[in-house]
Amino acid sequence: MKVLVPATTTNLGAGFDVFGLALDLFNEVEFSFDTKETTIESTGKYASDLKDHNLFFEVFRFFERKTGYRVPPVRIKQTCNIPVSSGLGSSAAVIVAALHIANEGTGRNLSREDLMKLAVELEGHPDNVVPAFTGGLVVCYQNGSHLDFENFEIDLSLTFLVPNFPVCTNEMRKILPEKVPFEDAVFNIKNSCQFLAKIAAGKIKEALKYVGDRLHQNYRINGNKKMKEFVEAILSKNPEYWFVSGSGPSVCSNINDFEGIPYLKDVLKLRVNNRGMIVSE
């Protein structure tokens, strides 16, 4: 059996912790329960960037605690096509894949909505994991155990600049202030509303004019020397739009000149994936 879980980009600038987008770049995870011991092997472009496979085991233990079902031994082979610790949802992809595997191994007792809720609880916020399940652009809301979301199918290509250094999502969240200026909050409300209004009207490219943010990006950029140099070099190219992907360090921008950008490792040109997770026998 195989499950393909897409990369995701979140926040999209103004939509902090609310907007998420699935991309047509997938981690491929083959698995079989024809084994007496759980083993995990990773191959692919970014496999060498993985420190370990602990997250798979953490998800299995979490699933068992929450459901009471025991996950049987499983043999897993993962092809890592999503950059690791780069703001493109590599951890969310593992969470979603592991929950799917656990559910398969225990009799498919949980619905997709049940698995989504478990994924959100594990991840801490819904904007990465929900689009990995559903595909498309997701507007999501979480309050305690209550999860609500809407998703939109959109036709869009985006360019992501991936640097050669990682960042820790938890550390980046600690940088954020507890309070922000009133005018910055209004700025983000205006942009997020305009972004969604353009999406709803089918004006996809016009929506990208409203990804400007004042709530989180500058704090993250200024909190990391390499990140600041990386973003400043991108901005020197005068892009029409740009935003930090998730907590970073990857940046989405429409520039075509990549000369002189420090730390640049990969340029990924990706389309929106409107299907979400793909399962095959």
Image (cartoon, rainbow, N blue to C red):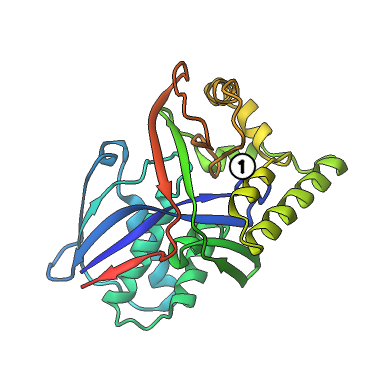
Query: In terms of image quadrants, where is residue 104?
Result: bottom left
Q: Nearer the viewer, residue 139 or 74?
A: 139
* Residue at x-position 43% and y-position 40%: 85
Quarter of the image with the N terminus is bottom left
Report which residue position mark 1 lands on.
173
In the foreground, 260 or 32? 260
Q: Where 93 falls versus 110 (above or below)?
A: above
Tell which residue pokes out farthest to the top in this image.
260
Left or right, 4 with respect to 203, comes to left
- The location of residue 142, given as percent across then percent down, is 64, 65
Name which residue lies at 39% across and 39% down.
268
Tell me if I can see residue 60 in this picture: no
Spot occupied by residue 4 in the image (x, y as percentages of width and height): 31, 61
> In percent of the image, x 29 and y 72: which residue is there?
71
Pick the quarter of the image with the C terminus: bottom left
Q: Farthest residue toward the right? A: 182
Reply above or below: 89 against 113: above
Front one among 64 and 112: 112
Q: Nearer the viewer, residue 11 or 176?
A: 11
Identify the element where label 1 is drawn.
helix
Looking at the image, residue 48 lies above or below residue 76: above
Is residue 117 shown left or right of residue 97? right
Tell me which amino acid carries mark 1. Answer: Arg
Relative side of 143 to 92, left or right: right
Q: Position of residue 272 (x, y in %)?
A: 45, 55
Q: Is residue 1 visible?
A: yes
